[in-house]
Image: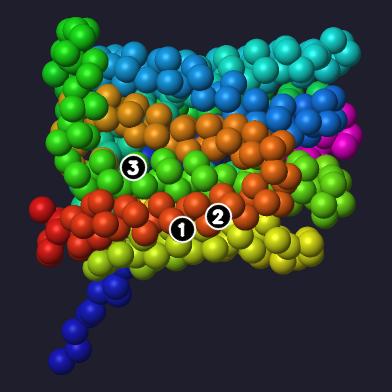
Amino acid sequence: MSHDVAPKQKPRSILVEHPAFGFFWYARGASALAFQMQAVAVGWQIYALTHSTFQLGMVGLAQFVPMVLLTLVTGHAADRYNRRTVAAVAVGIQGLVAGALALGNIGHCLTPAWIFAGVALSGAARSFERPATQALMPSLVPPALVPRAIAWAAASFQTATIIGPAVGGLLYAVGAAVPYTLAAVLALAAGGLTLMIHQERSAREREPATVQSLFTGLHFIRRNPVVLGSISLDLFAVLLGGATALLPAYARDILGVGSWGLGVLRAAPAAGSLAMSAFLVRRPLGRRVGRKMFGAVFAFGLATVVFGLSRSPWLSFAALFALGAADVVSVVVRSSLVQLRTPDEMRGRVSAVNSLFIGTSNQLGEFESGVTASWFGTVPATVLGGLGTIAVGMLWMRLFPALVAFDRLDGAGKGSA
C-alpha cells in the first residue's frame, strides 16, 4: 500500500512570518543607509574645510550632547506615546536636515558651523528614534525569536552601513549636495515605512510623567548587574577603541586612498558585522554567551591596534572587517539581554539609557579619538585606544563575574536567570 507523504516545508523567513517586523527591518535599513551616507559626506566635508582632526572629533560631540540632554525625555516618550509614531517623526526630521544640508551645498553657503548645527539637530532626532525602535522591536515577534530578530536587524543595519559609506563617498566626488539629497529621500522613505508597522500586540500602561518615572530606567539597570555590566562594557571598550572618527585622516594622509577609499574603509567594519550577523541568524550563540562577548571585546581591541599600525589599504580593510565582526557579537548579546530582561512598559526608558551608552561609546568616542590624535598623533592615538579596550575587557571580567558566567540568552543554564 502506498502512502502519500507530505513534503517538508522549508521554514519561512522571519520577514514573511511576521510582516510587521518586515516593515521594521526595511525602515531600519533605509534609515541607516541615509545616516551613513550623510556621515561620510559630513566627515569628508569638515576635514576638507578645516584640515583638523580635532574638528572631526567635534562632529561626534555635536551628535552626543543632544543625546545626553534628552535621554530621560526620549525614554519616557517611547513608553508613553505610540512608539511607531515617535520613530517615524524622528527619522522624518533627519530627512529634513539632510535636505537642508543639500540645499546649503547647492547655494554654496554651507559653513562648518551650519554643518555642526545640522549634525546636532539630527543627533537630537536620533535620540528619540533609537529608544522607540529598540522598544518597539520585541513586540513584533514572539519572545523566543527576539535574539534572531536582533541579528536580522543588525544585518539590515550593517548592509546599509556597507553600501552607505561607499556610495556616499562616490557621490560626494560627483558633488557634495548629491549624497545629502539621497540621504534625505531615504530618511523620509524610512519614516513612511515605519508608519506602516502594525500596532504592538498589547496595550501598555502609560505612567504619568513624574521625576520618579523618568529615572526608572536608570534604577532598573543599576539593580541588574548583568545588564549594567554588558552595556557599560560596550561604553568603555568602544569609547577607547573608536578609530572610525579618524578614517578621513587615514584615508587622506596615511593611506592616500581619497574620498572613495574613505567610503570603502568606513564600509569595512560593516562588512565584518554583516558577515557575523548572517552567521548568527543561522547559528545563534547558544551557550557561554558571556565568555564569547568578552572574547569579542579582546578581538575588537586587537583589530584596532593592527589597523592603527597598518600602512597597507588591504590590511587596514581586513583589520576593520575583523573589528566589525567582533563588535556585532557584543551588540547581539547586549541587545538581547536588555530587551528580554526588561518589562515592556519600561523598555523605552531602559532603551534610552542603553542608547546613551551606545551613543557615548560612538559619538563621544569619536570626540576622544579626535582629541587624542591632535595631542599624540593619529597612529599613537589609535594604538593606545585598542590597548585600552583590551584593558577594559580584563577589568570588567573581574568587576562583573556574573556577566562572565552568563550562559544562555534563552533563559536556560547557569547565569541565565
Residue 140 shows in this picture: yes
Amino acid type indicated by mark 1: Ile
Is 170 magenta? The answer is: yes
Mark 1 touches mark 2? (CB < 8 Å): yes
Image coordinates of residue 254 in percent, x first then y, are 82, 52
Q: Which residue is mark 3?
A: 231
Asked which secondary structure carries label 3, the reply is helix
* Residue sitting at x 28%, y 46%: 229
Residue highlighted by disc 1: 390
Instruction: Look at the magenta stretch and give its main secondary structure.
Output: helix
- Classify the position of the N terminus by image quarter: bottom left
Residue 250 to residue 73: above or below:
below
Residue 209 located within the stretch drawn in magenta: no
Can residue 197 be seen?
no
Q: CB under 8 Å between callouts 2 and 3?
A: no
| Label 2: how many Cα within 10 Å (few below 14, some 14–19, many 20+) | many
Q: Is residue 225 left or right of residue 10?
A: left
Q: Position of residue 193 (x, y in %)?
A: 48, 28
Q: Amino acid at mark 3?
A: Ile
Which picture quadrant has residue 36? Answer: top right
Label 1: how many residues lie within 10 Å, few (<14), some (14-19) or many (20+)?
many
Q: CA distance from mark 1 to mark 2?
A: 7 Å
Residue ID for mark 2: 386
Decide which of 257, 35 is in the foreground and name it. 257
Rendered view: 257 above or below 376: below
In the image, what residue type sits under mark 2? Gly
Magenta stretch bounds:
165-176
8 or 23, which lies in front?
23
